[in-house]
Image (cartoon, grey):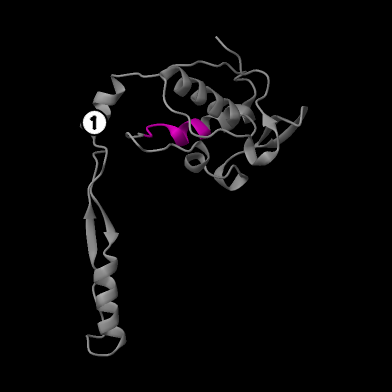
Amino acid sequence: MAEQPGYRLDRAGFTHLFHIYFYGSGTSSMEVPLKLIYPKVDSELLAYLREKPIGHYVTYFNAGNKNRSRNIALAAKAINNQVVFPNETFSFNQIVGQRNEKKGYVRAPVIVRGELSEGIGGGICQVSSTLFNAVDRAGLLIVKRYSTAGTSRTCFPDATRP
């Protein structure tokens, strides 16, 4: 699917029209003013970027664990095709969002405070850890790294180095 321009509310124009409408000197309806927004990324740029790998890292997991595999696939799909331009920051948690049943995440093994247990989204730390190592190997600046919600949650031990 080719890129398409989007629209954003023209706040200044809307405020002006709203004041005219609200104070009664305008028409009883108004068309919402919009500003055209062009995509920062187009298919030509993506084609170029796909030819230029900048970092690489591999981890392995037991694909037989269906729940863990599902969570890993959901997290990987969320970060797929994200483009970070110079002076921009990528946030794994912002892109992946909440890990909950509503978004399709399921219970899978996690390690919390050194103990093996089950939790919604178990396995996604493998995606974030693999991404972190690829970014680190690429020499990109890592500005912040922390444990999930202060729970000392770590990856299930099948995340291994090649």
Span highlighted in magenta in the image: 74-82
Which corner quadrant holds the N terminus?
A: top left
| Residue 151 occupies quadrant | top right
Q: Is residue 56 magenta?
A: no
Q: Determine the residue located farthest toward the top in the rendered image.
A: 162
Q: Residues within 10 Å of mark 1 (few under 14, many from 20)?
A: few
| Residue 34 occupies quadrant | bottom left
Residue 32 in view:
no
Residue at 23 percent across and 73 percent down: it is: 31
**Disc 1 residue type?**
Leu
Which corner quadrant holds the C terminus?
A: top right
Asked if residue 111 lies left or right of residue 162, the reply is: right
Residue at image mark 1: 45
Q: Position of residue 14 (x, y in %)?
A: 27, 71
Between 151 and 123, the one lying in front of the other is 151
Q: Is residue 80 magenta?
A: yes
Residue at 68 percent across and 40 percent down: it is: 150
Between 85 and 120, the one lying in front of the other is 85
Q: Position of residue 84 (x, y in %)?
A: 36, 34
Asked if residue 94 lies left or right of residue 33, the reply is: right
Q: How many marks?
A: 1
Main SS class of the magenta portion in the image = helix
**In the picture shown, does residue 5 fall above or below 63?**
below
Residue at 50 percent across and 36 percent down: it is: 92
Q: Position of residue 44 (x, y in %)?
A: 21, 31
Q: Position of residue 62 (x, y in %)?
A: 62, 18
Q: Determine the residue located farthest toward the right in the rendered image.
A: 115
